[in-house]
Image: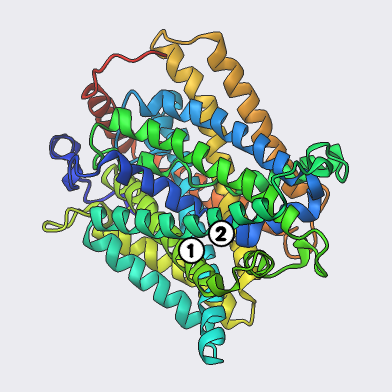
Amino acid sequence: MSHKGHIKTAESVNNAYGLKHAALSPLETLGQSIANIAPTATPTVVIPLVYAVSGGGTWLAYLIATFSILLVSSSINQFAKRSASPGSFYSYTIEGLGSFWGAIAGWALLIAYIGCASAVTSGFSNYFNVLLEHLGGFKIPAVFLIGLSILVSWYVAWKDIQLSTRLMLGLEFASVSLILLLVGVTIFNFGFRLDLDQLLLKNTSLDALKGGLVLAIFSFVGFESASTLGSEAKNPLQSIPRAIIRSAIIVGAIFVFSSYAQVIGFQGYTETLDKSTAPLNVLADRAGLSSIGILIDIGAIVSFFACTLASVNAAARILFLMSRHGIFHSLAGSAHETNSTPHAAVTIASVIAFFPAAILSLAGTGDFDIYGWVGTVATLGFIVTYGIISVAAPLYLKKRNELKWPHIVTAVISVFVLVLAIIGNLYPVPPFPYNYLPYIFFALLLAGVAWITIIHNYHPHVVDEIHRETSENSSRFTTPTQA
């Protein structure tokens, strides 16, 4: 990491940082956020985990999580509807809390996105091998599939952001359509009757619901990643806030109805939902749609791949801008002359994302364990950045003389929910190795804090340039907005 070779930001602001300017439609921008959530991953992996804690209250845990994420999105959009850049929370936090906290938010989000990219490659590997075993009776070593997922994601992200977003949107639309088909058929087979045991919360408790809420919030991480497309989206002050809100609402609705339907679908089955390794396949069999089992596996594969691609895209743009500012080496701040993509940052993010999953796989760790371990570290990165942005938003509005009491209430509730999520990772003390994962995250976070402290103490010209460029970028957007 180096501050040398700093790139002049005045030029980068004028040419949209060398990235493809105003190229993405609102639908393509929405595709980035939805793909980063990986909505197919939750019904196949996370909902059974939430059910193990919350039982029949799983649907309510997801409903509360949806409202919680919408509160966080309200804080994010105080920035997103007023300015735009590739820096996402990094740039937003600078405007609210200054360059030091902005850099910490950027570093935490890099841990989150790169960790997410690494974690979901194991989901890709698992379902790819499930498909191979079903079709040909053989498997491929997971490390090769992890490498394949990263390699293809790297190429698409290196080549063209429009190709990336269109591919992600198409893949997720196909896989989510299968889930909605299963949900509809399952509820139809139940006779469209209300499941009163679920709705009246007969098989859950307040403590169980709280534990499930923490896991349910995890399902949404990445919903904000459209904010990294600030230079590439058309009408970013409109399309990005809408993408953030709509992704949370759309995916939240899918999670609520999927969890409700999965609990119904497993009633009377020999295996409980929390013990199932392929819950959607079970739903398909019980709904008389066993023939679409292969399509479900394919849907899971493409959803995990789309999430890897979305995470690489998002991480690369944050690394790109932080490098242009001098926090990291200027090599990562270069844009491809032909493709107009942050090609060096894409390559660096892809290489780093490959190693955690690959090393654990070579050590004999199972795919779902990799998903859980690396994903937990990544999720803590998201939670920390959500907390920082929730604090930064009212301070930012105060500087603009636009602060109102609903903004303060929203920020307080958001921070409370996020602190609850962090505490849920620490107490009750989870089993090994989950009891060590928060400390691994905080060690990574502190390493970044140490470097950022050095930059701020010994390279003040970098700090001055960060504030100058952020102010110059913000001044480009003069559209009046309602607070």
- Give neighbour class at mark 2: few <14, some 14-19, many 20+ (Cα, 10 Å): many
Q: Amino acid at mark 2?
A: Ala
Q: Quadrant of the N terminus?
A: bottom left
- Examine the rendering and report whether any part of residue 458 can be seen: no
Mark number displayed over residue 304: 1
- Examine the rendering and report whether any part of residue 186 can be seen: yes
Q: Is residue 291 above or below residue 80?
A: below
Q: Residue furthest front?
A: 191
Relative to residue 318, is residue 127 drawn left or right? right
Quick check: marks 2 and 1 in contact, CB under 8 Å? yes
Q: CA distance from mark 2 to mark 1?
A: 7 Å
Question: In percent of the image, x 21 and y 51: which residue is there?
Answer: 5
Mark number displayed over residue 45: none
Question: Which of 385 and 183 lies nearest the eye of the viewer?
Answer: 183
Mark number displayed over residue 41: 2
Relative to residue 242, is residue 208 drawn left or right? right
Relative to residue 100, is residue 122 drawn left or right? right
Question: In percent of the image, x 80 and y 64: which residue is there?
Answer: 272
Q: Quadrant of the C terminus?
A: top left
* Whole-percent x, y for residue 111 in the image: 50, 53
Question: In percent of the image, x 73 and y 65: which residue is there?
Answer: 433
Q: Is residue 439 above or below residue 142?
A: above
Which secondary structure, mark 1?
helix
Relative to residue 471, is residue 31 drawn left or right? right
Q: Quadrant of residue 133?
A: bottom right
Which secondary structure, mark 2?
helix
Tell me which numbered mark, 2 or 1, is placed earlier along the sequence: 2
Q: Quadrant of residue 444?
A: bottom right
